[in-house]
Image: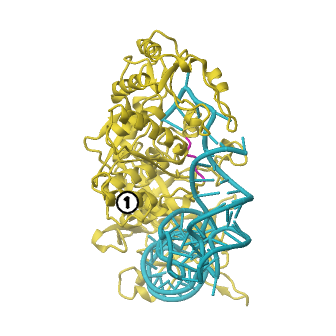
Chain colours: A yellow, B cyan
Amino acid sequence: MSTPATPANFIRNLIDEDIATGKWGGRVETRFPPEPNGYLHYGHAKSIFLNFGLARDYDGACHLRFDDTNPEKEEQEYVDSIVSAVRWLGFDWGAHLYYASDYFDTMYACAEYLIGAGHAYVDSLSAEEMRELRGTLTEPGKDSPYRTRSAAENLDLFRRMKAGEFDDGTHVLRAKIDMASPNINLRDPAIYRIKHAAHHNTGDRWCIYPMYTYAHPIEDAIENITHSICTLEFEDQRPFYDWLLERLAEGGFFKRPLPQQIEFARLNLTYVVLSKRKLIDLVEQKHVDGWDDPRMPTLAGARRRGFTPQGFRLFTDRIGVSKADSWIDLSVLEECMREDLNKRAHRRIAVLDPVKLIIDNYAEGHGEECWAPNHPQKPELGKRALPFSRELWIEREDFTEVPPKGYFRLFPPRLDAAGIMQPGNRVRLRYGYVVECLGCDKDADGKVVAVHCRYFPDSKSGSAGADAYKVKGNIHWLSAAHACSAEVRLYDRLFAVPYPGRERDYLADLNPHSRTVVAAQLEPALKAAGAEECFQFERHGYFVADLVDTKPGAPVFNRTVTLKDTWSREHG
RNA sequence: AGGGGAGUCGCCAAGUGGUAAGGCAUCGGAUUUUGAUUCCGACAUUCGCAGGUUCGAUCCCUGCCUCCCCUGCCA
């Protein structure tokens, strides 16, 4: 991808400073540390581009690290989906693929050290009792009666925890810091708990697992991460991050400088829900067809939707990085996708809501070819033939019996203000002839079944004098005898309101029209489209051949995003 | 309420003592065989509020207001 300079942000400033002072000898090493307990979503894209982008721009490295410290929630399916999503975005971690679970031995050794140094103890309170002693936001906590256990007793207990002698929840290893700290995270946080659960990576080898707060700083230190970037909600955790690494540095486990945690504001998008819990609900309650449903804000869904890695890159550069809570309008993301697709997508014709257009003065059985460029702004991309004949498909909305003011598509002859009959409107059949509307046929219900017109033989696009016909309207069409039909899915935003869940349960805010399936008519060239090939269907938007449902010779298309449409925006 | 953060144009976002970048959106206008694209132009005397320091404040100081996060053996 071309590389526009990424705008300045506070993290880059910080890194520049570290480089200037030589803190890390110019080294920049980041990491993207997802927990494999769900699919990656748009918010992760921000983090991925941030972390991998920094590594790219500073000639550093970014590690892909699975933060798999909770075996009850993590699965191999999720690690696979994460690997494929990060790759899809275009990033490569080289040899730097890690698992927190790879470090369980080191983490355990650190814990034993902490116990020996008097920095950790085994607490045997129940979860409820611990909660009671923790105090509240305004009141200090109280020491656990087990806080004064000797190092020897703690060590013995901890080893027996590891050996599997105890049931889940009976003991927990805690850091010994300060139960009266105004920062609740420093009130002797739990760092190891007993979980008799099989781990996707380590199997049954462990029955005690480290907590995120304890594990993460150690992971960073082991991997020599220089800048550990995470979201704002971990800000209160930073003092513990630093406390832990300082203790461990004292114990000779790590050398200074120690990695530093830097927090940025997570992505909030209107009309979208990004919390893992809600995404899981949507999938499990079948409001969507799985994690990769094109309506899902997951990267797997985005891919099927036709969103592009380059579009995401544009988006993340455009929204920037800061510590201010912000809401980005979904239209910003959509516009980024349009901008990227506009440059690359070949143009094709598709009639999504077909109605017949019959050219009364065109010989029956006659046919010819019209030529259409693949990209009007890029002639080097070539052109393809569009068969033309007497009976065409046009878009139902490109004809109306009673045109609203400013409508410049097809409408029949009508009386003007002076009572004089005026001819029907003229439009150009894009890349073909100019036609004049003669009228229409309707069925018993009054529904238009065919539109009639006459064409002007000397108006064919590209022929000498064709430009003499000045028309405002330009509509797309397909020869009925040559078009092929296909399923096309018109996707719209999954939620109907900007802030789902703000006024009521978020599920009540689901958009009932988030997917409309139509039987469309497509130009012949489209029949050969392969999965993930994207096109602009002229005057409609960008579409992609569905990754999973497209079969050879039988594409199924998903609408990625519509074209900007100032006419319907102003006319309902 | 204790602690931690944030408040700069409709939405993002730089700047952090020398007199408000940029992007998106919007609005004009031009080009256009996609009511698309592209192009050109306009768009904060003002930086949450009130005081103070200073020749000079978005930036420093004081007070206030608003919003977000923290009381999992989740991450």
> Is A14 displayed left or right of A410 in the figure?
left
Question: Which residue: 39% across, 64% down?
Answer: A6
Q: Can you say which quadrant of the picture contains the C terminus of chain A?
A: bottom right
The chain containing the residue under callout 1 comes to A
Tell me where the magenta segment starts and ends, as one range. A271-275
Residue placed furthest toward the left: A95
The residue under label 1 is A17
Residue B27's place in the image compared with A139, above or below, is below
What residue is drawn where x is 37% and y is 20%?
A203
Q: Quadrant of residue A209?
A: top left
In the rendered view, does A360 fall on the left or right side of B58?
left
Q: Main secondary structure of the magenta part?
A: loop
Residue at the extreme top: A165
Can residue A159 be seen here? yes
- Residue A273 falls inside the magenta stretch: yes
Q: Is residue A529 visible?
A: no
Is the residue A280 above or below the residue A149 in the image? below
Q: Quadrant of residue A22?
A: bottom left
Q: Position of residue A499 (x, y in %)?
A: 65, 52
Q: How many marks?
A: 1
The amino acid pointed to by label 1 is: Glu
Question: Between residues A132 and A68, which one lies in front from this camera angle?
Answer: A132
Residue A150 vs residue A79, the one in the foreground: A150
Residue A242 pos. (x, y %):
45, 41
Q: Residue at the spot x=43%, y=16% of the render?
A: A155
Image position of A187 (left or right of A485): right
Q: Is residue A349 magenta?
A: no
Label 1: state its secondary structure.
Answer: helix
Near-viewer residue (A148 or A43) = A148
